[in-house]
Amino acid sequence: MKNKTNIIFIYADDLGQGMLSCYGQQHFSTPNIDRLAGEGMRFTQAYGCAFCAPSRASMMTGLHDCHRGTWTYTRGGIYNQLSAGQITLREIDELIHTTGLQAGANEVFLPQVAADSGYVTGQIGKCEWGFDTTGDRIRRHGWQYHYGYYDHARCHGFYPPFLFENGQMVEIRGNTHPDCGVHLDWESPQNSEIRQDRKGKAVYSQDIFDQKIKDFLQQHRNTPFFLYHPSQLPHGPIAIPEIHPEVKDNPHLTPFEKEYASMILRLDQTVGLILEELERLGIDDRTMIVFSSDNGHEVYALQQGRTTGRQQNLNGQPFDNIKTKFYSDMGGDIFNGNGGMAGLKWSSWEGGTRIPYLVRFPGVIEPDSVSDHMLANFDFMPTLANLIGVEMPAGKDGISFLPTLLGKSQQQHDFIVYASGQGPALVTADGWKLRYINQPEIFQLYDLKADYREENDLATDHPDLVDKLSQDLLTACDNDYRHGTPQAHYAAYPEPYT
């Protein structure tokens, strides 16, 4: 058992490829995250989902998010009612475990693959199932230790008055805001004052998680482990105790943008802490680290006249996400967080779904290697199974990319699919992309190898290809394109909790 590979998966939140210096960020550097790339492999064509909940469910189940009847997620925020005394923990558990689909007795989740092979499994951070979860559900998924938030809505605040450890509520002394200190996205004098007011904001959540990560690594240094750290960073609203020294004097950034950059630099510090702790414990050479994000880029440093976000350009003209869409120059994103691609989170454009993906394993993966192998977040389950030498659970969609990590020939996906609010999309291994738009009902076709910015719709030029790919997409959606929308997976709480 001592010779088995440890696995650490660090999962950023709303982090576009372009926000990391190893993918081209110009306004600051992420040296510890870059170290993962420099000492391992960087993927250029990795895909998540359009937003957080399906991305996490997809990775946990090994299934893409366009199936019928695979999972459901609820509205977030139920734990805010707990803070307000409007509901009890027992009532929350009952609500969550009677709303929507529940896991079948034979369904296998990602951590179970490791646990069934003798691994200690731990989850520290944002909840891995949305938008609300419970300790029982997390244990059912195979996490033997878990610490963090149980509600995605509360994850938008970084000063929680309580968190959960193995199903038990843990008070965070000095944090008194029932909503964890959430505030508005748009910059204003009032918003700035709220952010700078530290009353009731004694402990920053990432500081708590860092210590719990260190404790977990120290406790399990002599046993094989799978540690999953879904960070809140850099999901907004922007909140950071202090501006990082690297960007403090940057003349090109506003104070709000410096705060946002500091959130990413704070995540980089966590990666550095993990690397340092692995070396200190003497287990660095038998630990594989994966770093990725749930979805593509989102703009949070919203400032009137400077940055507008996904809804409209700097001139106030709305994006319809059919003929007009977000690009960094049109929306005023000085960071170019989507790496020059189209779109943001929630969309099926490349900027909304293409994610950073880095893997480091000293002595196994060729340092400073780059791969254009197309992978999806649901490919990690078979990769984990392949790595630790166990059989892959049946009925899953993923393909192991361990051969690519080892520099060997690799089975390819013919295509991958993912859902969005406008409808599902399909990307082929040779670079064709089909977007289905549900209102109006149309298809768009792009050649990503020649047009990664998705500027030239070629659907009318290639009708036969559209016919073929649309049928492939329909089949993947279990014969109904509506399954490729978030609405197909949403389960509403009953009154009065809706």
Image (cartoon, grey):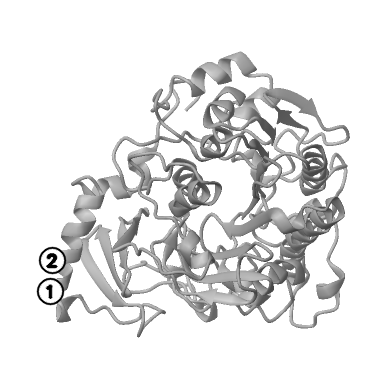
> Real-space Cα distance between discs 2 and 1?
6 Å
Q: Is residue 328 above or below residue 438?
A: below
Query: Label 2 amino acid?
Result: Asp
| Residue of label 2 | 467
What residue is at 37 percent from the left and 67 percent from the top? Answer: 321
Q: Secondary structure at mark 2?
A: helix
Snapshot quadrant of residue 49: bottom left
What residue is at 41 percent from the left and 67 percent from the top? Answer: 374
Q: How far across and how far down the image is residue 424, in percent?
A: 31, 56
Q: How far across and how far down the image is residue 403, in percent?
A: 47, 63
Q: Secondary structure at mark 1?
A: helix
Tell me if 271 is positioned left or right of 248 in this view. Answer: left
What residue is at 60 percent from the left and 40 percent from the top? Answer: 153
Query: Label 1 amino acid?
Result: Pro
Q: How far across and how far down the image is residue 434, in percent?
A: 27, 67
What residue is at 71 percent from the left and 63 percent from the top? Answer: 264
Tell me if 368 is positioned left or right of 327 in this view. Answer: right
| Residue of label 1 | 463
Residue 482 visible in rendering: yes
